[in-house]
Image (cartoon, coloured by chain):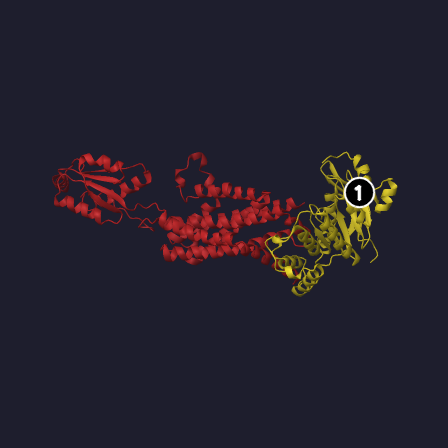
Amino acid sequence: MNDPIISVRKLTKRFGDFTAVNAISFDVERGEIFGFLGANGAGKTTAMRMLCGLSFPTSGSGRVAGFDVMREGEKIKRHIGYMSQRFSLYNDLTVWENMQFFAGIYGMSQRESIARSNELLQRLNFAAEKDTLVGSLPLGWKQKLSFVIATIHNPGIVFLDEPTGGVDPITRRQFWELIYEAADSGTTIFVTTHYMDEAEYCSRVSIMVDGEVRALDTPANLKKQFAAETMDEVFRTLARGAKRGE
Amino acid sequence: MKKQHNFLSFVKKETLHILRDVRTMMIVLLIPVVLMILFGFAISTEVNNLNIAVVAPTRTDGVRQSIERLANNPYFTFVGYINDEQIDPMLRSAKADAVVVFDSDYERLMAMRAEGMDTKPVMQFIFDASNTNVASAGAAYLQNVMTTDHSSQQLFEMHLLYNPQMKSAYNFVPGIMGLIFILICAMMTSVSIVREKEMGTMEVLLVSPVRPIKIILAKMIPYFVISCINLTTILLIARYILDVPMSGGVGSIIFLSLLYLLLALALGLLVSVISSSQVMALLLSAMVMMLPMMMLSGMVFPLENLPKVLSPLPYIVPARWYIEAIRKVMIMGLPLTAVLKEISILCLMTVVLLGVSLKKFNDKLE
């Protein structure tokens, strides 16, 4: 079980003449919080879609959660969690109904999903809001709920696509506490973000520019390498050389 | 077992969406009832309560008999005797829709006719034709009522088969069925699929292990159930309130309708694949599906009146074939074997539509 949960080699995606992702290679260890950074248009989303089994790589190879990204997309889907940058629970269903639904589509049995939902509600301290319509919850709560629902089927790894967009600093802080908790219990976190202070929270960070991974290390080492005070400076230095615009 | 569960939770979730939205659900369930009542009673092409004034210079027995017949007819209301000068004001003020003018020599002329002689006309109808539908239908009725057993030289004998009372409900019920099912199956389903795209939830669903085709199927099931409820309501109203005969058997009608429902669902799938927003799905359904359907299905306008250039168009409107088949089975009482052509065309359309939309759907995913 000590092999990396994500391991990709020369993963490439081309759309016609355009190379969205150009031969990226990296490993993500189990239990890690892996920050996946890059300006808009750098190829982050395309890379993530390939890792989630949503899109076939043009060439290269890779394994996610033990399955081949080329051939076993469907199996990958069953073993990962995913939280989209857009809020993606159903506003017209209650907290409980949302949980039951997502547990259901991941193939959990009735008994499993009830036990697991109760456990998560307890952990969030949210049992009282069980029958509240999700639409009437404050944004911060919705975000946290999205996160725990993304982990409802106990996936080995959760992909978070800019999970804290549009959320106030206090809620962001609380959200990251949830992420730490999940990572402590062994879930690998793969997170993209635009907030450089959040990059500091990650165990390791990769920065994509023009479809390539230009830097990959712990935040501390990256700052040393680029002789920068903050991750923000590191990012700016790298992004300045970008040829692709928005 | 596991697979079953994930599909079922999908159907359950879709059902919850519909149940939560009480207003929409009420509308969907009530639309057929309202339309049926509206078209069945309020909106009809029958001519009712036509106000008739009479100019009769000599009120002989023959004239009186004619007028009595007129006054007793449920379609006409006899508003009174007037003189020549009043004809125009009566019509202008809309106190009368038509005026019947008897010749002053009525009795003598009728007697001459009875002996087989040619005479000048014995009476004149003056119609307010500002509404052409009322005027032409009314004129035909009036002529019928006033000439029976009068003219000894009856040239034609007319029999109206299948709908002897010319009830417009007979005509509209199949049309409404064609309309409702497109509305619910195609429009509601496509809007609900596109809503997930628009909300961003589709993304999460696609990352989940549920097969995309199952997402679509699960969405269709609740709407299919609603359509079946509607079908029941429509058939009940048609049979017991509007007295539509259903002479070809309820089984055949249901079979045809289920086939058409399938077709409508395939259409909805296609719309949802093409459109990227709910507004677009609505517009596509309304402008591209509903309008041509109303115009070209033969429900409102006779297809025979279409200009030559447009005449191939109705052949590709699914509703037209459905409505034609339903009309044959429901009103004319023909067995299913008589509508084999319509059935095979509907089947063919369903297969083609399903094929195209599934292909497009899969292409879109990559």
Q: Considering the numbered disc 1 on the image, is that residue within a helix, a strand or a loop?
A: strand
Q: Chain of mark 1?
A: A
Along the viewing direction, whichever of B16 and B187 lies nearer the viewer: B16
Instruction: Note the chain letter of the red one.
Output: B
**Picture quadrant of residue A185:** bottom right
Name which residue lies at 30% across and 42% down: B137
Residue tagged 1: A207
Q: Quadrant of the N terminus of chain B?
A: bottom right
Instruction: Note the chain letter of the yellow one.
Output: A
**Picture quadrant of residue B154:** top left
**B343 with respect to B148 (left or right):** right
**B215 with respect to A4 (left or right):** left
Which residue occupies the extreme front position in the image?
A170
Name which residue lies at 59% across and 43% down: B277
Give how far across and how far down residue B26 sits, in percent. Answer: 48, 54
- Res. A52 visible in picture: no
Give how far across and how far down residue B43 sits, in percent. Answer: 37, 47
**B83, above or below B73, in the image:** above
Crowding near the residue tagged with mark 1, few <14, some 14–19, many ≥20 C-alpha atoms within 10 Å: many
Give how far across and how far down residue B269 sits, in percent. Answer: 57, 48
Along the viewing direction, whichever of A245 and A94 lies nearer the viewer: A94
- Res. B130 visible in picture: yes
**B356 with respect to B249 (left or right):** right
Please give the count of numbered marks on the rendered protein.
1
Q: Quadrant of the C terminus of chain B?
A: top right
Along the viewing direction, whichever of B267 and A213 lies nearer the viewer: A213
**B36 with respect to B89 (left or right):** right
Name which residue lies at 12% across and 43% down: B60
Give how far across and how far down residue A157 sits, in percent. Answer: 76, 54
Q: Name the kind of residue labelled 1 in the image.
A: Ile
